[in-house]
Image (cartoon, rainbow, N blue to C red):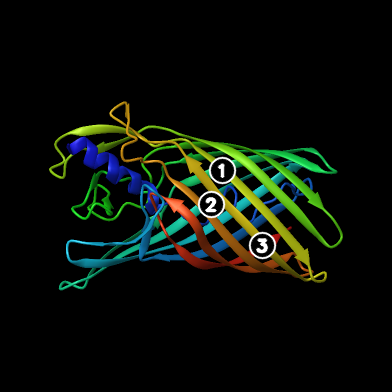
Amino acid sequence: MMRVVLAVLIAFMLVATASAYDPMYSYRNAGTAPAGSFGLAGRWVYLAATDYYDDEGNKEKMEGFGYEEKDTWQSITFDAYYATMDQWTAGVFIPYTFLTYNYTDARDDSEDASGIGDIWLYTKYRFTDAPMWTGQFGWKINTGAAPVYWGPSGWLWYDEDDNPAIGSGQMDLDLSLWFGLPSESGRFDAALGYRYRMEGELDAMVSRQEKIKYDPGDEIHYYLNYVYFLNEAWSLGLASDGYFGQDDKLAGETWDDPTTARNAVYLDPYVGHNMMNGWSLGAGFHYPIMGQNIHASWGFDAYVGWNW
């Protein structure tokens, strides 16, 4: 029975670091930077949730034990990249994450944590120019404070310092194929990728006396984006991204009753502004269309980038 409960809870465990914004897909395209160019960017994302999608895809309130819950997730993700040649770019995503869990009850309590999350190293190679076909590979390193045990609420996962965990506790490998079709009036980009999620370890009991292996289900990711150029400086875009996961494994066994697979589809309208001195600005909105075993998180973001 304990393992069944853990299987259900693990379906929500990695939600702490999953969101409508995925640095390996969101707002990216099939293009690569010119040879020798260097770029820096930062994106602030704010997401909030009072609802969640259950294992059947139904939207439910996050409440129980006499309280209501509101979770907020904020992240400032830094992107640094360098193009060794016109077709080949490599970079790193470094997220600084803020988590807050608010409980509205007699306690009126909250728990929060902040720190560097899991880092992504990535590289992309463009095979053709017109249309663009590009391959991208990413490696997520579990640098964020990893979950060690689960709390009584079932939603909250703690690290070894008894703070909410902002890391996943395991590594991912992500391989995707991108298609890009630019034109004078706009551009269309699409991507399809596979994310291999490696095994992690967790305390099986709140008493933290027994270790158990968990293997989060692998995921298929997609991204669709069309941006329309209003003029040389301003653009409007509409994107959709999401993923479809397999059931998790717990202690080597696949748990699919209830299902633990995480699925999500998001809609992301945004606006961008390019300046002549290499700077660029942007802002977007994120809204969940459907999901399964995830928070129904919605929110917005702001972006600033520089290329030399």
Circle 1 residues within 10 Å: few <14, some 14–19, many ≥20: many
Density class for disc 2 (Cα within 10 Å; few <14, some 14-19, many ≥20) is: some
User: Element under label 1?
Assistant: strand
For residue 133, what is the image quadrant? Answer: top right
- Image spot of residue 292 (x, y percent): 42, 49
Instruction: Give the spatial CA distance, label 3 vs label 1.
Output: 17 Å
Q: Which residue is mark 3?
A: 238
What residue sits right under mark 1 in the picture? 221
Q: Measuring 74% from the left and 43% from the top, which residue is drawn there? A: 179
Residue nearest the viewer, comparing 76 with 252: 252
Q: Which corner quadrant holds the C terminus?
A: bottom right
* Mark found first going from the N terminus, 3 or 1: 1
Instruction: Give the mark, 2 or 3, whose residue is nearer the N terminus.
Output: 2
Q: Nearer the viewer, mark 2 or mark 3?
A: 3
Q: Tell me the distance, in whole angstroms, between the alpha carbons under discs 1 and 2.
A: 10 Å
Instruction: Say whether residue 58 is left or right of residue 276.
Output: left
Can residue 197 be seen here?
Answer: yes
User: Could you tell me residue 260's position as x and y percent?
Assistant: 36, 41
Q: Nearer the viewer, residue 246 or 139?
A: 246
The residue identified by callout 2 is: 22
Which of the labelled discs sits on residue 306, or is there none? none
Give left or right: position of 18 versus 157.
right
Task: Give the residue type at disc 2.
Answer: Asp
Q: Identify the secondary structure beneath mark 3.
A: strand
Q: Amino acid at mark 1?
A: His
The type of residue carrying mark 3 is: Leu
